[in-house]
């Protein structure tokens, strides 16, 4: 069997859902399981609803709910056979309205926010299943929540893999064996008690990978709106090229450092079983896309040792200087315990004799982190920074590479440099406004014309 995951842009409206159905038709021999995101923009709209309720903005709540109900209803009506989804969606919108009423004026609890945010995938999967039936396929709509059992860290819940593997095999395999095409939701899950959770923004890719691993899929297809993983973001570098193949490690590095094509955790469940991920463009299904696999023949792009450049803005650099760390042990541990306690993820780390610089993206718990770090040494922050990550083959072992990189990055001021032990990435921190130029100059240096 295979897993086909369709992102928000591939289920944006009746036209894109129609295209999805035609793609699924070409995959029937592979026994597909379909995982969908919410319609494009719907998760954001649902989160905005939760905020509006908290702000007691009744007008905005009503407008938001009506807008969502209208958009899903008109999509259903436009799809041949789509009307069968109408009842379930309407009922669910009503349930959502009364739930939101319940949160009005109080800070929504993380559990409330997840219950609200998880609606988008429930609705989109109803539409897709109806459209597939309308086209003569045999879909089976499946509520993933009793299968995708997670802990209760709302908005970033972690699935319990063993339970999920077992339930996925029990619930989904018989459907596939019966010749049906299961259609289910990405991104959402539930605690063992059935309280809805979400896996984090962009988490539908992760759902697809988890289900692919559970069912020993022969591949996991991620359908999106770009041709695959690229040498750079084509909006910044029009000459960017698509990579035909990538390793799991590269895909994870690229995702972590800003290439928004894949969720960073996607490769994780698939590595051990060696199940390939194929990133495909739903607008151009005839294109080969990028295959992410262990044995992927990593072609060099031209004669460049580098394969891709990504960047991510909205980064804060935290610097800690503590003369007493010179020759002392336990200092880094004490520092990282602060980040661990506050569950703040560190992306890049560079350390000198008496100072450490690290980068974080999430600023929500920064005050508390800085307060505690100040007990260890002098702390100062630099915000509005960007990480530029260069991913390539054997970067550590390529003579002269660092010089070429630096020449290309100039005249931007590089503030932190770090190189992972994996020898496949090198990261720079620059000012946010310098990011796009640095990416363009690096691309020109290593891949030619911009
Ligand atoms: N709909 C969710 C989001 O917008 C999950 C996803 O699309 O992967 O983050
Ligand atoms: Mg996505």
Image (cartoon, helix red, strand yellow):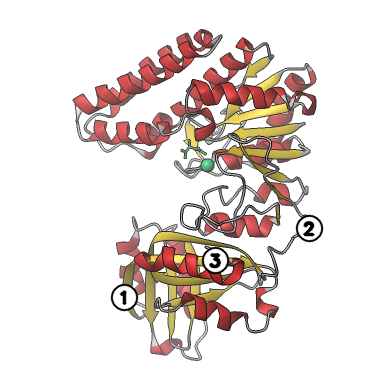
Q: Residue at x 56, y 43 (%)?
A: 226
Judging depth in this view, the residue of 238 and 91 nearest the camera is 238
User: As drawn, is 177 to the left or to the right of 440?
Assistant: right
Q: Residues within 10 Å of mark 1 (few under 14, many from 20)?
A: some
Q: CA separation, marks 3 and 2?
A: 22 Å
- Give percent across and percent down for residue 278: 69, 43
Disc number lying in front (3 or 1): 3
Q: Residue at x 70, y 70 (%)?
A: 303
Q: Earlier in the sequence, mark 2 or mark 1?
A: 2
Q: Residues within 10 Å of mark 2 (few under 14, many from 20)?
A: few
Q: Earlier in the sequence, mark 3 or mark 1?
A: 1
- Give percent across and percent down for residue 208: 63, 37
Q: Residue at x 41, y 89 (%)?
A: 324
SS assignment at label 3 = helix
Residue 254's label in the rendered image is none
Disc number lying in front (3 or 2): 3
Q: Is residue 164 visible?
A: yes
Q: Which residue is mark 3?
A: 443
Disc number lying in front (2 or 1): 2
Q: Is residue 143 visible?
A: no
User: As drawn, is 404 to the left or to the right of 180?
Assistant: left
Q: Which residue is mark 2?
A: 297
């Amino acid at each position: 069997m295979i897993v086909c995951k369709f992102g928000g842009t591939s289920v944006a409206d009746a036209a894109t859902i129609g295209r999805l159905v035609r793609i699924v038709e070409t995959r029937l021999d592979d026994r597909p399981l379909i995982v969908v995101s919410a319609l494009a923009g719907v998760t954001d709209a649902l989160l905005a609803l939760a905020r509006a309720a908290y702000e007691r903005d009744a007008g905005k709540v009503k407008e938001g709910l009506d807008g969502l109900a209208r958009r899903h209803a008109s999509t259903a009506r436009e799809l041949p056979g789509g009307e069968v989804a109408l009842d379930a969606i309407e009922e669910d919108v009503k349930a959502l309205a009364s739930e939101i009423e319940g949160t009005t004026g109080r800070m929504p609890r993380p559990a409330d926010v997840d219950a609200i945010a998880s609606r988008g995938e429930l609705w989109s999967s109803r539409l897709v299943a109806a459209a597939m039936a309308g086209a003569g396929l045999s879909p089976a709509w499946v509520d993933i929540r009793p299968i995708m059992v997670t802990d209760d860290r709302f908005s970033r819940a972690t699935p319990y893999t063993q339970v999920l593997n077992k339930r996925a095999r029990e619930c989904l395999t018989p459907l596939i064996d019966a010749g049906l095409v299961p259609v289910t939701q990405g991104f959402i899950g539930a605690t063992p008690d059935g309280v809805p959770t979400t896996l984090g923004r962009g988490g539908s890719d992760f759902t697809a990978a988890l289900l692919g691993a559970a069912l020993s899929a022969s591949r996991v297809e991620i359908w999106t709106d770009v041709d695959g993983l690229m040498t750079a973001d084509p909006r910044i570098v029009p000459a960017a090229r698509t990579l035909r193949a990538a390793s799991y490690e590269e895909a994870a590095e690229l995702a972590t450092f800003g290439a928004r094509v894949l969720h960073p955790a996607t490769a994780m469940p698939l590595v051990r079983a060696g199940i390939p991920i194929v990133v495909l463009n739903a607008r151009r299904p005839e294109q080969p896309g990028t295959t992410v696999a262990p044995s992927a023949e990593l072609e060099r792009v031209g004669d460049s040792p580098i394969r891709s450049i990504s960047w991510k803005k909205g980064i804060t650099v935290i610097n800690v200087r503590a003369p007493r760390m010179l020759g002392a042990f336990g200092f880094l541990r004490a520092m990282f315990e602060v980040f661990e306690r506050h569950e703040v993820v560190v992306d890049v780390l560079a350390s000198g004799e008496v100072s450490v610089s690290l980068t974080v993206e999430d600023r929500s718990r920064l005050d508390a982190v800085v307060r505690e770090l100040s007990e260890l040494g002098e702390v100062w922050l630099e915000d509005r920074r960007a990480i530029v990550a260069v991913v390539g083959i054997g970067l550590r072992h390529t003579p002269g590479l660092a010089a070429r990189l630096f020449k290309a990055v100039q005249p931007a001021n590089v503030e932190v440099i770090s190189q992972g032990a994996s020898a496949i990435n090198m990261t720079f921190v620059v000012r946010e406004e310098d990011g796009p130029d640095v990416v363009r100059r690096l691309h020109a240096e290593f891949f030619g014309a911009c």
